[in-house]
Image: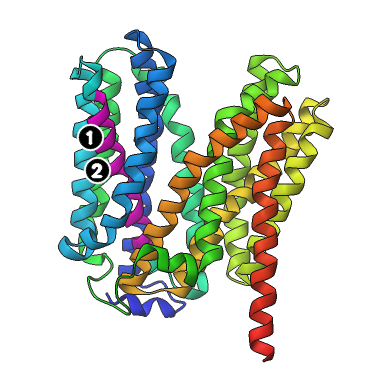
Amino acid sequence: MDASSSGSGAFSASRLRGITAAISAITAVGIGLSLSLPLLALTLEARGISGTWIGLNTAVAGISALLVTPLAPALAFRIGTARATYYSVALAALALIGFYYATAFWMWFPLRFLFHGAVTVAFILSEYWINALAPDSRRGLVMGIYATVLSIGFAAGPLLFTLTGTQGLVPFVSGAALLVAAAVPVLLARNDEPPSHGEGGSLPLLTYLVGAPLGTLAGLVFGAVESGSLSLLPVFGVRIGLAPSEAALLVSAVALGNVVLQIPLGLAADRFDRRWLLFLCAAIGAAGALLMPTVSGNLWLLIAVLFIWGGFIAGLYTIGLTHLGARYRGKALAGANAAFVMMYSAGMLLGPSTMGAGLTLFGAQGLPFVAAAFFGVFALFALLRISSRRARKAA
């Protein structure tokens, strides 16, 4: 299949098989990853490792993602997207089993680097696969379905602890099995993968920050606010007087909004100017963050605000990927997806630290104020880009 054929609005059988396989694969990876992350933290805690060292070991994930991301497009076009994807998930599965047998804590650092590096490559290649095969006129819908299914997968992972428990080899094997399962749909649809040729060539990752800054920076802002919020919203809840069980509901509200609103936002991305939609998501993100302290005295009103807020901030992810997919083809699209994931990873490093500092310096309201600042700056930049584009057209 030729990637250039994505200009058509039709879903051919081959294209549909390829998209379905990529979405199925990355969902399995998402379930395995969401099971693995808390499992690794709980295992280190049970082995007597301090919170500081657990945090430092976890931070290796972000470093690995940043370093590995530029290599993913070249890997895909050297050995093929399907082969690179299932090699990645196989390596991640082996690394996950390795954590159980690595009794010396220092061994967890190279294992963490391998595990998250392999998962990052799988994510980049799957998103490229989906974006390359999505028809232009239905690209937003496809990315909305992808984001929705992936969110459900992430939510489902921790639920498996009720079956596997958190101790012993069983949860590690279960997580590894889910990762290996991701290779099955990829193998079945290997003839429907994006081609190793196509329009455009590979570009330096920084080129995409200049060529499509709204799309790539959307990944940064979403990564920062999502990671910071999911980590620290329970702390915000406790500091405004909620019980820990009630504070946990705040994270659930954001996650549920993410699941429910991505397909509608994807459909909107197929009909309206994506730059304006990115501005709208950022504006609602800023407004919702500023509303949090105001409605914090009413738990259910706060949950309703966070539900809407979670859906629209995740729209930066869905619409940002759609925007890049409409702009690039072939190897350039693979590079654009890598740039998006790299910015998302940078946001994951930036968000929790700045939002945590906001909590320390300004109390509970510091978290939503920092989140509002992220969105406000992005919304202002989006307006400047839209105005600049209009001025160029008028000239």
Asked where in the image residue 380 lies, by quadrant, the reply is bottom right
Q: Residues within 10 Å of mark 2 (few under 14, many from 20)?
A: many
Q: Nearer the viewer, residue 172 or 149?
A: 172
Q: Residue at x 59, y 42 (%)?
A: 225
Q: Is residue 151 left or right of residue 207?
A: right
Q: How is the image coloured?
A: rainbow
Measured as percent of width and height from the top left, residue 55 is found at 42, 24
Q: Is residue 265 above or below residue 9?
A: above
Disc 2: which residue? 89
Q: Residue at x 55, y 29 (%)?
A: 231
Disc 1: which residue? 93
Q: Amino acid at mark 1?
A: Ala
Measured as percent of width and height from the top left, residue 326 is found at 48, 73
Q: Nearer the viewer, residue 27 or 355?
A: 355
User: If the image is split into quadrants, where does the N terminus sit?
Assistant: bottom left
Which mark, by number, is residue 191? Answer: none
Q: Is residue 149 left or right of residue 123?
A: right
Magenta part of the chain: 108-130
User: If the image is split into quadrants, where does the C terminus sit?
Assistant: bottom right
Measured as percent of width and height from the top left, residue 169 is found at 24, 17
The answer to the question of whether label 2 and label 1 lie on touching residues, with beta carbons closer than 8 A, is yes
Q: Is residue 283 above or below residue 191?
A: above
Under circle 2, the secondary element is helix
